Amino acid sequence: MKNKKILIKDLHNLKMKEYEDILRKDRDFDWEYILVLLSYKLKRTKNCISEKGTHENASVVANQIEEVENLLNRVIENRYLKDISSEFEAKYGKLNINFKKTLDRNAYTIESSYSKTSSPKECKNAREDSITLFQIARYMRQDDLDLAFNMMAKNIQNWWD
C-alpha cells in the first residue's frame, strides 16, 4: 500500500512538472490563454487515447481531438489577416503607423498610411479595404472557434479511454 501511495505521488509530481511551463506563461486577463490551456489539455488527452488505445475507436477519437486542437491553435496563432492580405499589400503596400502625442501630452493620436499610396483618395480606399479585410479575418477566426467548440460539444463525451 505504501508503494502505491509513493507511485501516485510521483505521478502527481510528474504531471505538475509537465504543466509547469504552460502555467508559468498563463495569464488571467485574456481569453486566448483559456484556449492555450484547453489546447494543451486536448493534446494530452489525444496522446493518452492514441498511445493506450484500449477503446475500439481510439484512432477516430484521437483524430477528432486533433482536429479541434488544430482549430484552436489556428485561432491562437491568429494569422488570418496575414493569410488574406497579399493582394492588398501588393496594391497599397505595407501599413505605416505613427503615434503622435496630442497637445495635452496625455494622449496619442494614430496616423496611418500605406507605402504605395500617394493621393488622399488612394489612402481612403486603402483604409476602407483594410477595414473589410479586418472584418473578414475576424469572421474567419470566429468560424474556426465556432467549429472547434461545436465539434467538442458533439464529441467530448466520447473522448475517454
Image (tube, rainbow, N blue to C red):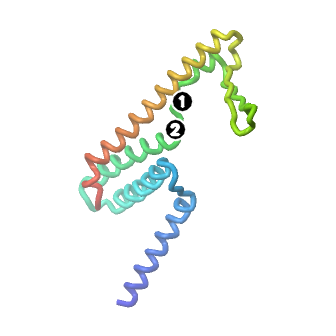
User: Please, is residue 12 above or below residue 126 in the view?
Assistant: below
**Image location of residue 123, percent across then percent down:** 64, 15
Pointers 2 and 1 in contact (C-beta within 8 Å): yes
Residue 157 falls in image quadrant: bottom left
Would residue 3 appear left or right of 92 to someone viewing this image?
Answer: left
User: Please, is residue 36 above or below residue 103 in the view?
Assistant: below
The local secondary structure at tag 1 comes to helix
**Image location of residue 136, percent across then percent down:** 46, 26
Residue 71 falls in image quadrant: top left
Residue at (39% x, 47% y) in the render: 66
Residue at (25% x, 59% y) in the render: 55
Residue 92 falls in image quadrant: top right
What residue type is disc 1 on?
Leu
Kindly identify which numbered label has been placed on residue 104: none
Residue bearing mark 2: 78
Residue bearing mark 1: 81
What residue type is disc 2 on?
Asn
Q: Quadrant of the N terminus?
A: bottom left
**Image location of residue 133, percent across then percent down:** 51, 23
Residue at (29% x, 52% y) in the render: 156
Front residue (pair 160, 55):
160
Residue at (46% x, 31% y) in the render: 138
